Image: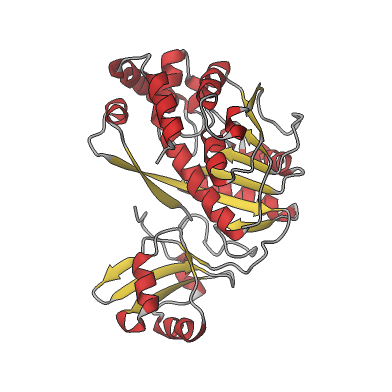
Amino acid sequence: MLPDDLRAALDQALARHSPQELARSVARLTERYRGSATGATSAPGAPGEAAHIRGQADVAAYAAYRMPATYEAAALAMRHAAARVPGFAPVSQLDAGGGTGAAIWAAGATWPSLRQVTVIERDPQIIDLGRRLARTAQAPGVRGTAWRQAAVGSGLDRPRADLATMSYALGEFAERDRADVVRWLARDAAMVLVVEPGTPAGYATIAAAREVLLAEGLSVVAPCPHDRACPIEPGRDWCHFSVRLPRTSLHRQVKAGTLSFEDEKFAYVAATARPAPAPAADRVLRHPQKRKGVVSLRLCTDAGGIRDVLVSKRQGELYRRARDVGWGDAWEATGEAAGEATREAVRETAGEADRPAADPG
């Protein structure tokens, strides 16, 4: 859920336009993007849509349509990364291709230590709205953000930052340029976090970025519990996660939706210049499947593989934890309970990772 100060600022910005005007702008943005999209995704608000903004109403519509979902995805990814590196207290952040600033708000909520924040964004109208929103923030780092108009690229000079982020932007670049952009983003950063849509194409972008970060000597802290090759075979499945966010009445009107919530699917990688201080727990890759007295978990393990584990009611506390764990959460079973859960596993082979799986959302 958006923090109160961001929700209030966004509502005030949107109040300058009627819901009908915003809905028309969303429809136009969607049509423009779909008319020019040539690759990975045609979802509204996906990488590349900002290039089709042509006025203040479009900027407001874009923020209404995408900022809540981008914030929630980035915030969840950041919380997972922060849990792996509890001593990380960044002072500076660089957000590349930052749009209206959803990722800096998420970072400010995750790491209150942030004081020096820079957003690089190419569109001056988007910068104008992002700056107006940020000035209302309670977090000092967000409130004092420096906004720089420029096109992100490997040759662009950039401020040094403890935390470097890029949300729903890497996929805008030609595939041949993405590795150089990731190297540029990671330069001198203590932590790098990249978020993309939770589509097969978005995951492929994240998987390639992960390989670049590892080659640059960084260690992955989330979502992967290991630095080995991803066990998911490209083209047969993809690693992604989901976060549910509420829709306000205005949000429903702008999106022409009827549900009071939406689920944002996303893929991400977080890596640090130094290894995490503690071993990683396994990561839950799918919605846990719950049947009477049994919970089935698909896990990415610290050994670099994927396994499916059954946890039964007779396992007491472990079963209660399995009932509460969610898609994307860390999962750790130790001692006798871990051994019993492993014996309960019904599919624990590398081949299972290659089996096609439907999107569990």
Q: Position of residue 270 (x, y in %)?
A: 60, 51
Q: How many marks?
A: 0
User: Which residue lies at the image location 30% right of the left edge and 41% below the top edge?
Assistant: 261
User: Which residue lies at the image location 70% right of the left edge and 61% below the top edge?
Assistant: 275
User: Which residue lies at the image location 62% right of the left edge and 69% below the top edge?
Assistant: 279
Q: Is residue 173 above or below residue 208?
A: above
Question: Can residue 195 be seen by looking at this rendering?
Answer: yes
Question: Can residue 45 be seen by looking at this rendering?
Answer: no
Q: Position of residue 235 (x, y in %)?
A: 49, 54
Q: Position of residue 100 (x, y in %)?
A: 52, 27
Quadrant in which the N terminus appears: top left
Q: On the rendered structure, is 155 left or right of 314?
A: right
Camera-side residue: 361 or 90? 90
Q: Position of residue 185 (x, y in %)?
A: 69, 40
Camera-side residue: 354 or 342? 342
Camera-side residue: 154 or 186? 186
Q: On the rendered structure, is 351 left or right of 205?
A: left
User: Which residue lies at the image location 48% right of the left edge and 20% below the top edge?
Assistant: 52
Camera-side residue: 227 or 42? 227
Choose top left, top right, bottom left or bottom right for residue 140: top right
